[in-house]
Image (tube, helix red, strand yellow):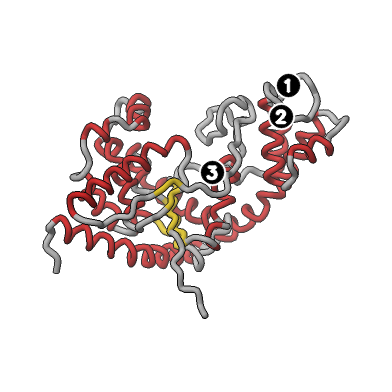
Amino acid sequence: MENTERKPIVLSAIQPTSVPTLGNYLGALKNWKMMCEDYDCLYAVADLHALTVHPEPAKLRQQTLEMYATLLAVGLDPEKNIVFIQSRVPAHAELAWILDCYTQFGEASRMTQFKEKSAKHADNVNVGLFAYPVLMAADILLYQANFVPVGADQKQHLEIARDIASRFNALRGETFTLPEPFIGKIGARVMSLQDPTQKMSKSDPNPKASISLLDDPDVILKKFKSAVTDSEAVVRYADGKDGINNLMSIYSCCTGLDYAAIEKEFEGKGYGDFKVKVAEAVIEELRPFRDNYKRLMDDKQYLLDTAAQGAEKASRIANRTLTKAKKKVGLLLG
């Protein structure tokens, strides 16, 4: 007899900024493709969120397509997952306005990210930046998501999404599922190759600090050779060895070896040998992605067609929730 039990719903979104780093891949993207066995997964390119910093239009369109290709290239099968572009589903913006009216000014103004970005972009503190968490709440609540994978910097946004949903449900009746943070397989926390006390970031001004998923093999090798380590010259995981700990973590993710096995493999060998081996493991790990990405970017029509199909599937779910919410608040329907 067929098992018709509904899988829990997971939603995750990523902004179409520059090419993701090895940190984004090992920390999140690598695990996303395995989640469809146990969950109904929706993955979005969050291009509406990117508008807060006024990107150059042609660049945003190109980066949106590139990020969509990236999601497919890491192995997110559009037949098993719903992979879509946020702005192609108008319900996101429409529900965001309704939820704006159920969000208190005080709770929105307490968002840490708003304070940080306001300080960073003091000449462009727009309402979109302020209302960003409400749009994020709409992204999640439209699909009745049970779980959302969030990093430490996004936990506050998930909390406000729950608060908004709870308030709406209390005032207008049960409408939205309250999302929980996704606690699944934890990806590696990959640190900067030049300052291993800081997380690897694509916005790092030092080009040697991060590995882009599209870096050529020789560039990856050079970056790992220049990675910051320590003077002990012993490959072992220990306090105070941030650089080596980071390299061991990366090597472990790419090879499946635990730290004890890595220490044994490099016993009596120096950091030079270890760095080369880590680089080679990363190059092999990223090879399928690079091949897939190139193939996809060479077939723009396939990307556009697949994005249209993803938006259609996402819209069918989103519009059910939106219609329900519109009825609850008293908007006149057809």
From this viewpoint, which residue is outermost toward the top? 231
Which amino acid, by three-letter code, is at mark 1?
A: Asp
Identify residue for label 2.
Answer: 244
- Earlier in the chain: of badge 2 and badge 3, it is 3
Please name whichever residue, 4 or 59, is drawn nearer the observer in this view of the structure. Answer: 4
Residue 110 is left or right of residue 271, and the answer is left
Q: Secondary structure at mark 2?
A: helix
Find residue 56 and report its horizontal and vertical position in percent.
37, 42
Identify residue for label 3.
Answer: 20
Which amino acid, by three-letter code, is at mark 3?
A: Pro
> How far apart are the two marked residues, 1 and 3, measured between alpha carbons?
28 Å
Find residue 82 and report its horizontal and vertical position in percent.
44, 62
- Earlier in the chain: of badge 1 and badge 3, it is 3
Is residue 228 visible to us here? Answer: yes
Image quarter where the C terminus lies is bottom left
Instruction: Please name the residue shown 43% across and 62% down the image.
Output: 307
Find residue 89 and report its horizontal and vertical position in percent.
32, 59
Q: Is residue 116 above or below residue 184?
A: above
Mark toward the viewer: 1 or 3:
1
Please name whichever residue, 31 or 221, is drawn nearer the observer in this view of the structure. Answer: 31
Q: Secondary structure at mark 1?
A: loop
Please name whichever residue, 247 or 183, is drawn nearer the observer in this view of the structure. Answer: 183
> How far apart are the two marked residues, 2 and 3, measured between alpha carbons?
23 Å
Q: Mark 2 and 1 residues: CB-CB less than 8 Å, in contact?
A: yes
Q: Is residue 139 above or below residue 239?
A: below
Q: How many marks?
A: 3
Please name whichever residue, 167 or 231, is drawn nearer the observer in this view of the structure. Answer: 167
Is residue 297 visible to us here? Answer: no
Q: Callout 2: few (<14), some (14-19), or many (20+) C-alpha neighbours within 10 Å?
A: many
Identify residue for label 1.
Answer: 230
- Earlier in the chain: of badge 2 and badge 1, it is 1
